[in-house]
Amino acid sequence: MQQKTTQESPELQKLDFLNFSKILHKHALVQGSAILADNLDETIEPKEFETLLYPSKPMKILVTMTLYCVEGHMKIRSNLMEYTIEKNDLLILQPGSIGECIYMSPDFRLVLIIFPDNHNFTDLYTKNPQTALQLGSFIQEKAKLSLSQEQMDEFISLYRIICGKLDNPEFKLKDTLLSGYLQILFCMISHALQKKRQQQEEEPPKRQNELFHRFIQLVHDHCQQERKIVFYADKLCITPKYLSQLIHRASGKFTSDWIRDFVILEAKALLKNEKFSVQQISDMLHFPNPSFFGKYFKAATGMTPRQYRLQ
């Protein structure tokens, strides 16, 4: 894939998360409402790969990202949930997620399709209502889907056709072509979801699991403002005691631990962005003052916010 923009491009700066920018900048295409990037035809140099093994700090993802694993494997943490991405896996992450790269194998090969503007992503799949419903449910509950080898081969073939057209300077209707092809890709994802459900005869989700997933989503959405268990229990229309018992049975962690860990995750992501002072971050997370924020952060991490920032 030929490089169409420089590394200074604001669009390509969207790749600067989960360590992907180190191997994908020179293989990225920016076209209209999407970024397409891959390392399918390149070998990662040993020195270059060593930089990928350093633990990354939590970073807030500001884009909608679809990741296709073609070879190898990696481990990431998104909103405190750990995922192992292996060959033929598809992962979808939404804006606002906090991601962290844990490990990436030397033979890791991937394709990324990124939507810097979430409205473009929404417009794309809402043109197919059935796909929208299935995809929305999939992203909220699991985020990862395992494809068959046939499905992945079909996707890669289509992806290479798209890149070939976008690389062709004589082809003028690139935005229109990209929109059409991406709709085909989302229909392929919808078909894969339907096929997987037909193959697996699973019991309907238990209420415990449903409430757990709803609780995690609520904490992700509201942890900057709300840290009291009663708030989340009220949202779920259950008692705080029942919520605490249910969450512990489902995850082995206490409700207060989940809330604290999400707050600390948000704090770490904000501290990585040096344009915010500790005072501003304390205000953004609705702590009464920076001193209280510092004690809260140190109790959870063993270091002050400033010490964490200087790591």
Image (cartoon, rainbow, N blue to C red):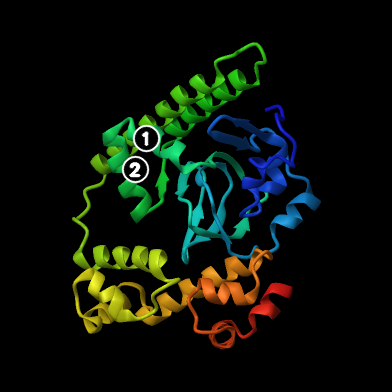
Work out whether mark 2 precedes mark 1 in sequence or the reverse, and give the earlier one.
Answer: 1
The location of residue 282, given as percent across then percent down, is 55, 77
What residue is disc 1 on? 125
| Image marks 2 and 1: residues in contact by CB distance under 8 Å | yes
CA distance for labels 2 and 1: 9 Å
Q: Is residue 90 left or right of residue 165?
A: left
Q: Residues within 10 Å of mark 1 (few under 14, many from 20)?
A: many
Q: Report the side of 22 relative to 229 (left or right).
A: right
Residue 204 x/y as whole percent: 19, 55
**Residue 276 in view of the camera:** yes
Q: Amino acid at mark 2?
A: Leu
Residue ID at (67%, 42%):
10
Q: Residue at x 73, y 44 (%)?
A: 44
Pinpoint residue 245: horizontal percent, then vertical percent.
Answer: 26, 81
Q: Secondary structure beneath disc 2?
A: helix
Compared with 41, 96 (above or below) is: below
The residue sitting at 35% across, 79% down in the picture is: 255
Label 2 vs label 1, nearer the camera = 1
Residue type, label 1: Tyr
How many labels were placed on the picture?
Answer: 2
Q: Quadrant of the N terminus?
A: top right
Front one among 188 and 125: 125
Q: Which mark is residue 135?
A: 2
Specify few, some or many for label 2: CA neighbours under 10 Å numbering under 14, 14-19, or 20 or more.
some
Q: In the figure, residue 199 lies in which quadrant?
A: top left
